[in-house]
Image (tube, grey):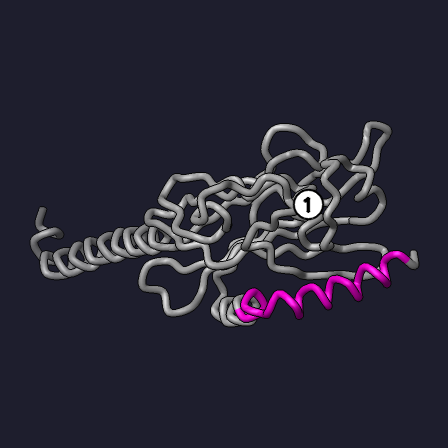
Amino acid sequence: MQWIEEHRELITALTGLGTLAVWMIYLQVFVSNYRRQLRATLLITRGSGSGLDARCFLSNMSSGPVYVASVLVKLETPAGSLMCPVTDMLQSEGEVPTEPRHRTRQGPLGSGEIRDLGSFGTLMRHALGKTSERHSSDDLHGTVLSVMVEIVGHYGSEDLPIGARRVFVVLENAGGPVIRGRELQTQQIRNRRDRRRLVADLERDRESSHAARSRVGAFRAELNGF
C-alpha cells in the first residue's frame, strides 16, 4: 500500500493512458465498421442451371439504394475481345417486357433487392449482335470463351460512379456449354483511379446505336474467319 501511495500519480497517469488507448481502438473499430456500411456492394451471380440459359442476377447488398446506370458485357473469343453495352434490351432478345420502364436494365435498385439481367446466352447474343430466336446454345458454340459482366452505377452522395464486375468462363462439355464463375466473389470497384475509368464506360454506353452496330459488325466478320 505504501508503494501504491508513493506512486499514485504515476499509476493514475498510466491508467488514463490505458483508458485512452482502449477508447481510441474502439473508435477506430467503430469508424471502420461505419465506413464499411457506407460502401456500395453489388453481387453478380448465376441463377439456377449451368448452361447459357442460366440467369444472371444483380443483387444490391449496400445499406442504401443504387442507381444502375450501365450494364456492359466483355466477351473473350478466338478473334479477340469485344466490350459492348447491354443496358437497353433489344427486340431480338425475345424477352422484352411490354412496359417501357422495364425495357431497360437501367434504374434504381433498392437495398437487398435483386434484378434479373437476363440469361447469359441473351447477354452474349446482344453483345455479338446475333438475332437468332432459337434460344439454344448452337449459335454460340465455340464462339465465346468467357464473359465479363460489369455494372456501373451511382450511390448516395458519391462524386464518382461505383461499379462491380465478375468474369464467367464458358466450358464445353458433352451436354453443351457450361457457365462457371472464374472467381468466387464479385470484384468491387472501389479504387478512385478505377472509378474514374468507369466514366469512360458510361461514355461508351452513350455511343450512338449506329456506331455500336458498325463495331459489332466488323468484329463478327473477323470472328467468322476463325
Can residue 49 be seen? Answer: yes
Position of 196 compared to 1: left or right? right
Position of 89 compared to 224: left or right? left
Q: Which residues are magenta?
A: 203-224
Position of 208 compared to 66: left or right? right
| Identity of the residue drawn at 58% across and 70% down | 207
- Amino acid type, residue under disc 1 in the picture: Phe
Residue 136 is covered by the magenta coloring: no
Up-down relation of residue 34 to residue 177 (above or below): below
| Identity of the residue drawn at 66% across and 65% down | 212
Query: Which is nearer the eye, 3 or 206?
Result: 206
| Identity of the residue drawn at 60% across and 50% down | 90
Query: Which is nearer the eye, 92 or 120?
Result: 92
Query: Which is nearer the eye, 157 or 72?
Result: 72
Q: Position of residue 100 (x, y in %)?
A: 45, 48
The C terminus lies in quadrant: bottom right
Q: Position of residue 108 (x, y in %)?
A: 39, 51
Question: Which residue carries the number 1 mark?
Answer: 168
